[in-house]
Amino acid sequence: MKIVFDATPMINERTGIAQYTERLVTAMAEAYPDDDFIGFYYNFLGRQDTSHLPRLRNLDYMHASVIPSKIVYQLRRFGIEFPVESLALTHADFVLYPNFLGYPSLFKTPSAPVIHDLTYLDLPEYVSAKLRSDLVRFVPKQIKRGSFVMTVSEFTKRRIIQEYKVPADKIIVTPIPPEPPKKYPDSQKQTVLRELGITKPFILFVGTIEPRKNVIKLIEAYEALPDKVRGAHQLVIVGRIGWYCDAEVAKLEEAKQKGLNVLHLGYVTDEARNVLYQSAVLFSTASHYEGFGMPILEAMSYGTPCAVSDIAVFREVAGDAGVYFDQSDPSAIAKTLAHLLQDRAALQNTGRQGLARSKSYNWQTVAASVHDAIADAVKK
């Protein structure tokens, strides 16, 4: 089969959707060497750096260089949609859209979108107005076009069924397994940590800085830790500044002015992120809402204990291996963090359980389930 996919999310920073796309198509290409996988993306006038894109014998890319993506998206808002064949410059047996929205096909080629979450409906105040409008308008059309729908958790599958009345057997759940952990020698770890400005054992958060990530409450919880515990640990926040986050930026600045040992690193390299996962004493996220919980599994794959929000999708991802808190209450978060940081046995046991949990996820199983669904759609 020739499977075309929208590689646009992979072009810029390695966000969660970018990593999901890269890992999924790479796993499928490796598992099914007789199939061809072609990613298409926008590269207006050839200005984008694409040297980081994974390439295999049967995994390659095409790019649309004569029109900016913003024009394509704007025309869609006016009811003018480019056919996928005009962007991918090839005719496919199947088209995969890993970032919610896609395009019509001149040949009615079977396709599937990946709907990662329904934040734009469940917590619309956390999504930019333009993106929210696009998703509300066009996700139903994309679902209708699709041979089936993919999502990343049973939680989001239930919400898609509720909201869009999609039959359960037309939704494939593809969780996001972590990559095999990359372990580094102590000398390399210490060099990376020193360059990042980390001088103490630390609590780690990884994610884009945006309101639904609830970073403000996490910082408040860190401030509420007992003096001895807070003094012995840094809070390290990894992630680029996102949208609607003036309050979060202000909170980070306030923490700095107060002399709190809160370090915002922004976007970091893969090596730095892996070193941080491997070196953290504890991983924590206080998110209000997620479609999955990829950083949790990444931390667990390094044996790093995880204390996280008590929300349904995190319970699904981490199971009994996670320690949960009420994300709306900084004192409850602080109590949970302090307990783990002061109880070495509990901390180590949580780390061991998380490591075992992370091994129950693998890309081979995910790739097989997606490939089987694609093959069935192509046969129809």
Image (tube, rainbow, N blue to C red):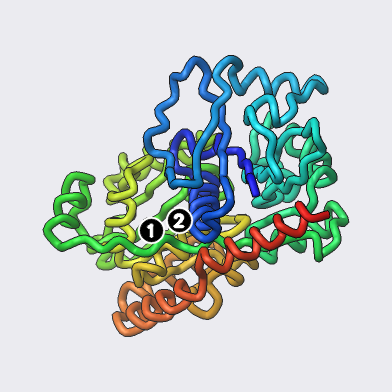
SS of the residue under disc 2: helix
Q: Residue at x 52, y 66 (%)?
A: 364
Q: CA distance from mark 2 to mark 1?
A: 6 Å
Quadrant occupied by the C terminus: bottom right
- Tag 1 residue: 222
Q: Residue at x 19, y 57 (%)?
A: 189
Question: Is residue 294 shown above or below 305?
Answer: above
Q: Is residue 79 left or right of residue 61?
A: right
Q: Amino acid at mark 2?
A: Leu
Mark 1 nearby-residue class (10 Å; few <14, some 14–19, many ≥20): many
Q: Amino acid at mark 1?
A: Tyr
Contact (Cβ within 8 Å) of mark 2 with mark 1: yes
- Tag 2 residue: 218
Question: Is residue 112 shown above or below 320?
Answer: above
Mark 2 nearby-residue class (10 Å; few <14, some 14–19, many ≥20): many
Q: Is residue 50 visible?
A: yes
